[in-house]
Image (cartoon, rainbow, N blue to C red):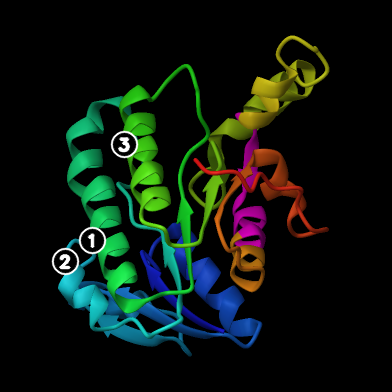
């Protein structure tokens, strides 16, 4: 399959690019001049700006799968302005370009919601989901809460708390929805989504993300 990645030089994007290449897919990665060296060998480099729909559109092929991974690094409550300037603006540009280029499937990494913290981040991601679902482009939206991986291991200490919460009926659903996933699980889920396109809006919450590498996830195919 032909896959276009916006945000393909980041923490999750480089790992996904390598995985897709290993599966035989043709991958094009959008990159600024300063980030070209981060694009994994084997991928095609598409020079451009994630905030500029025109530069994106010129790089996308008709029928491509578009994967959007752009976002503010290390989200925090005090970065509300950045969320709107980067996360929201880049998704708007991507959806606009994808619509004009007639992509076949759009994949977006959002965030688990609702949650008791990071309200500004959740709000922006909800707006992004609404924008994408309103575009009419077939889409898969993944909603992890925290992705464990290199440089992102501190929540491992919370695993006993999660295990305890998941056996209590009153909080089980929230504990599962706001559970931790690994970078490997995210990459597996994203690769699964690429290889199993949908014809409408599909949601993958944390439990489905965890299962995607083992079996076909039981996903929610309803609109956002």
Among the 4 quarters of the image, the one containing residue 78? top left
Q: Nearer the viewer, residue 81 or 62?
A: 62
Q: Quick check: 109 left or right of 24?
A: left
* Image-quadrant location for residue 161: top right
Tell me where the magenta segment starts and ends, as one range: 178-189
| Residue drawn where x is 67% and y is 65% of the image | 192
- Checking the image for residue 139, the label placed there is none
The residue carrying mark 1 is 93
Mark 1 and mark 2 lie on one chain; the one further toward the N terminus is 2
Q: Does residue 149 appear to the left or right of 3 in the view shown?
A: right
Instruction: Give the secondary structure at mark 3.
Output: helix
Q: Contact, CB < 8 Å: mark 1 with mark 2?
A: yes
**Element carrying mark 1:** helix
- Left or right: residue 127 compared with residue 173: left
Q: Which residue is mark 2?
A: 52
Determine the residue positioned at 39% across, 84% down. 62
């Amino acid at each position: 399959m032909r896959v276009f990645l916006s945000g393909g030089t980041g923490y999750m994007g480089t790992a996904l690019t390598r995985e897709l290449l290993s599966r035989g897919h043709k991958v094009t990665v959008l990159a600024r001049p300063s980030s070209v060296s981060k694009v994994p060998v084997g991928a095609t480099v598409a020079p451009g700006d994630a905030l500029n729909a025109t530069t994106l559109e010129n790089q996308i092929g008709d029928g491509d799968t578009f994967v959007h991974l752009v976002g503010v690094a290390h989200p925090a409550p005090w970065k509300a302005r950045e969320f709107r300037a980067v996360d929201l603006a880049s998704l708007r540009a991507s959806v606009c370009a994808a619509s004009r280029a007639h992509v076949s499937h759009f994949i977006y990494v959002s965030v688990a919601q609702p949650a008791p913290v990071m309200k500004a981040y959740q709000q922006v991601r909800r707006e992004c989901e609404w924008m994408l679902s309103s575009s009419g482009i077939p889409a898969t939206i993944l909603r992890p809460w925290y992705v464990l991986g290199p440089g992102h291991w501190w929540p491992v200490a919370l695993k006993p708390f999660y295990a305890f919460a998941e056996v209590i009926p009153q909080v089980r659903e929230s504990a599962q929805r706001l559970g931790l996933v690994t970078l490997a699980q995210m990459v597996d889920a994203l690769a699964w989504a690429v290889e199993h396109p949908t014809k409408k809006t599909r949601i993958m919450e944390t439990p489905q993300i965890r299962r995607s590498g083992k079996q076909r996830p039981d996903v929610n195919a309803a609109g956002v």
